[in-house]
Each structure stands twice: as C-alpha cells, then as structure tokens.
Amino acid sequence: MSAHHGRVIVVTGAGRGLGRAIALKLASDGARIAIAEIDRELGAEAEQELKTTGAETMFVPTDVSSQESTEAMAAAVLLKWGLIDGLVANAALANSVGGATYDRITVDQWDRIMRVNVRGTWLACRAVAPHMQKRGRGSLVTLSSDTAHWGSPNLLHYVASKGAVEAFTRAMARELGADNVRINCVAPGLLDNDATRGVPPAKREWNIRNRAISREGSPSDIVGLVSFLLSDEASFITGQVIIADGGLVFH
C-alpha cells in the first residue's frame, strides 16, 4: 500500500515550483491533495496536472496571510473529504522579495515578508491543526531555508522570516505532541525551479561550489523528505529542522 493511501493532505503554494512538485509526489504516494494557492490560474493548472495522473484533488483559492481565507480553505477541504491528515505549509515569498542591505529594506517590504512567510505559516497550521488534535493524529511540515543557518546577506527580511518559521515549528511541536500530532520543518538549499529563476548566476554558482555534493539542487531532492515526514514511518519525529542543501550547511 502507498505511504499516504487515502489520506487528505493540504499543500499551500502548490501552484508552482517546489509546492507543485510536493503535491505531485504526495499524490503519487496515494494522497488526496488539496491545492491551497493564491494564484487562481496556477492553482487550476496544478489541479489539472494532478488529475491527469489519476489523483483525487481539489483547488481552493487561498491567501495564507488571511485568517478568513485559511479557515475557509480548511472548511472546504473538510466539506469535501471529511478529514485532513496532513499539511505542507509551503506558501512563501522568496526570490520575488529582491535583494537589499538591511538599511535599504523598506518597512513595507519587511511587513509583507513577515505577513506571508510567518503569519501565513501560522494561519495555515491554525486552520487545520485543531481538527487533527480532535482526531488524535496528523502531521504538518513547514518550509524554511538553509539561509536561516548561514545568514545569506542582502535578504535579512527573508532570512529572519525563515528563522521564525523554525522557532515556530519547535514551539508548535510542544503544543501538539500530547494529541499525537507532529510538526517538522524542512530547510532546502537554493533549488533550480520557477521560484528561483531570478537568482544571480554568481550566487547560484557559489552555492554549488560550496556544497559537499557539488551540483544544482532540484525539487526532486526535497519531495521524498517531505513525504517521509508526513508518513507513519516518521511517527517518532517532531519539532525537528532538517536541512536538505547538498551539504552547504551541517546542522
């Protein structure tokens, strides 16, 4: 039997890039996938792609920075399938934030990053975790970045937001554990995908050159880890941050 046969898993930001790759992997492992995506066109495209594989899926337009939107998303999933077994809190602003020194980042830029990356992660978890607690089972995976561990320059707001996601994950693990609900965090390195197309070549080359495994990373290097953490095979793992970046950072 597949690792997630019949399970219902919500993936935020599943319209493109790593989020869509995670959704496809979980679907191939037998899960029913709720695509929670703010971009309606990308969300519909992802839904169609999953359907062509034979997966059960639904697209729910979702703004993770909005409590009303995330709660409506969870309600829609429960209405359709009656349960939620897993969540991948993937939605975030990354490459689109631009690069600037700490004193050049505007207050609006800082607040936008925190609103989506930190508040969005919290609200997505807040919308589904109570249901899991009532059932006495469930698993959540948040997404950070290896930059939170080595301090990439000119991205202070992004790096700070990902550090917050890691701290959030540890604290949530303490609150959810008594109800047999787990939460872990995956911190990928720089990947070759849609979300990172604008990364300067010099920065991409620096990452590759300084990894123990000196090659480009891709979503396929991450999706298996996410699937594992959501599965019963990881039933004794919670509150952990796992870096998957080819050995740029050892943790």
Image: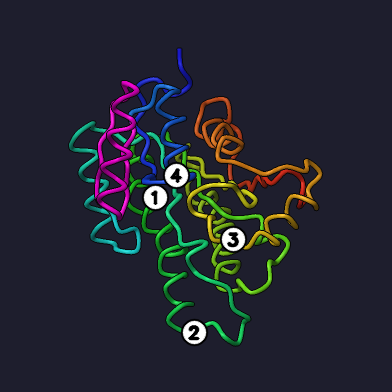
Looking at the rendered image, the quarter that the N terminus falls into is top left
Identify the residue shown where x is 27% and y is 46%.
74
Q: Which of marks 1 and 2 is nearer the N terminus?
A: 1
Q: Distance between the residues labelled 1 and 3?
A: 20 Å
On whether residue 46 falls in the magenta region, the answer is yes
Q: Position of residue 24 (x, y in %)?
A: 42, 32
Of residue 207 and residue 162, the one placed in the foreground of this image is: 207
Residue 213 vs 98, above or below: the answer is above
Type of the residue with mark 1: Gly
Q: In this view, does 76 lie to the left or right of 6?
A: left
Tell me if label 4 and label 1 are in contact, CB under 8 Å. Answer: yes
User: Which segment is the magenta one?
Assistant: 33-61
Picture quadrant where residue 88 is located:
top left
Q: Position of residue 232 (x, y in %)?
A: 52, 26
What is the C-alpha distance between the residues marked 4 and 1?
A: 5 Å
Q: Mark 3 points at which residue?
A: 199
Q: Give amino acid for label 3.
A: Val
Contact flag, marks 1 and 2 (Cβ < 8 Å): no
Q: Can you identify the residue that label 2 sits on?
A: 106
Side of 146 relative to 90 (left or right): right
Dot label at residue 19: 4
Q: Which of marks 2 and 3 is nearer the N terminus?
A: 2
- The image's colour scheme reads rainbow
- Is 232 one of the magenta-colored residues? no
Image point (19%, 34%), residue name: 80
Mark in front: 1 vs 3: 3
In front: label 3 or label 4: 3
Q: Residue 13 carries which label?
A: 1
Instruction: Estimate how packed mark 3 is, as few (under 14), some (14 to 19) or many (20 or more) residues with alpha carbons within 10 Å.
Output: some
